[in-house]
Image (cartoon, helix red, strand yellow):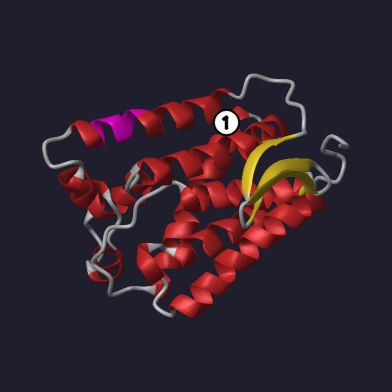
Amino acid sequence: MIPIRDENPVHIVPVVTIGILAVNIAVFLLEIASPDGGEGIIRRFGAVPFRLAFGGIGSLADYVTVGTSMFLHGGLFHLAGNMLFLWIFGNNVEEHLGSVRFLLFYGFCGALAAAAHIISAPGSVIPMIGASGAVAGVMGAYVILFPRARIVTLVFLGFLVQMVRLPAVLWIGIWFLIQFLSAVAGGSGEAGGVAWMAHVGGFGAGLAVMSAERFLCPRREAAVV
């Protein structure tokens, strides 16, 4: 399933969502323009679980990589997928939270996603990169706020391609089930080179934060769609 767009109108210019998109694209262009194809950048600014789990307190540079790793990607499809998901789900969440709170929320979910991956694979020396964990948090928030919003989706059935409109709770539910089962099957949390537990952790963080917000601030209702 490939999401195309959601049928959930936005009444603001989502400046933070656009800004995050722009920074990710700019960083990716720097990666591919570097002489080694970005390998040096990834080694320097990717988050290495082993260093963060066993490096001891005091290595500020290692902790900073939790943030910088969110803006690095391993290829065009990796970048395109994350940015597509961010654009579809991020603008409505930004409108609900406000730009400043959305930026803090995005960073928080990304940090929790990194922590989930580090806990699942503390001995890994492979740098973790990508916005997937933070974007997963945005998706967790979206499903709480707009469970009935329709997601226009391309569904591939063999050689047949069908465009369908699925409720967000079903679309995101299927997506999360795939992430969770992949994380369980992977064992180490790093199956196939994908940090599945980061997706699970980020989604859980977004789900928990937005659920708490709806409970503590019941008068802030999301738009009915």
Tag 1's secondary structure? Answer: helix
> Residue lying farthest left?
35
Residue 50, position in %: x, y? 26, 69
User: Relative to 221, is 16 above or below?
Assistant: above
Q: Residue at x 59, y 66 (%)?
A: 178
Q: Nearer the viewer, residue 182 or 215?
A: 182
* Residue 152 in sight here: yes
Q: Nearer the viewer, residue 30 or 165?
A: 165
Q: Is residue 29 magenta?
A: yes
Q: Residue at x 39, y 48 (%)?
A: 130
The residue carrying mark 1 is 100
Dividing the picture into quadrants, the one containing residue 190 is bottom left
Dot 1, crowdedness within 10 Å: few (<14), some or many (≥20)?
few
Dividing the picture into quadrants, the one containing residue 75 is top left
Q: Nearer the viewer, residue 40 or 81?
A: 81
Q: Residue at x 63, y 58 (%)?
A: 175
- Can you say which quadrant of the picture contains the C terminus? top right
Q: Residue at x 30, y 53 (%)?
A: 63
> Residue lying farthest front?
159
Q: Is residue 64 magenta?
A: no
Residue 218, position in %: x, y? 85, 46
Give, as a three-letter code, the residue at label 1.
Val
Q: Is residue 58 left or right of residue 197?
A: left
Residue 39, position in %: x, y? 18, 47
Residue 120, position in %: x, y? 42, 74
Q: Is residue 208 left or right of residue 118?
A: right
Query: In the image, which residues are magenta?
Result: 26-31
Q: Is residue 164 left or right of residue 127?
A: right
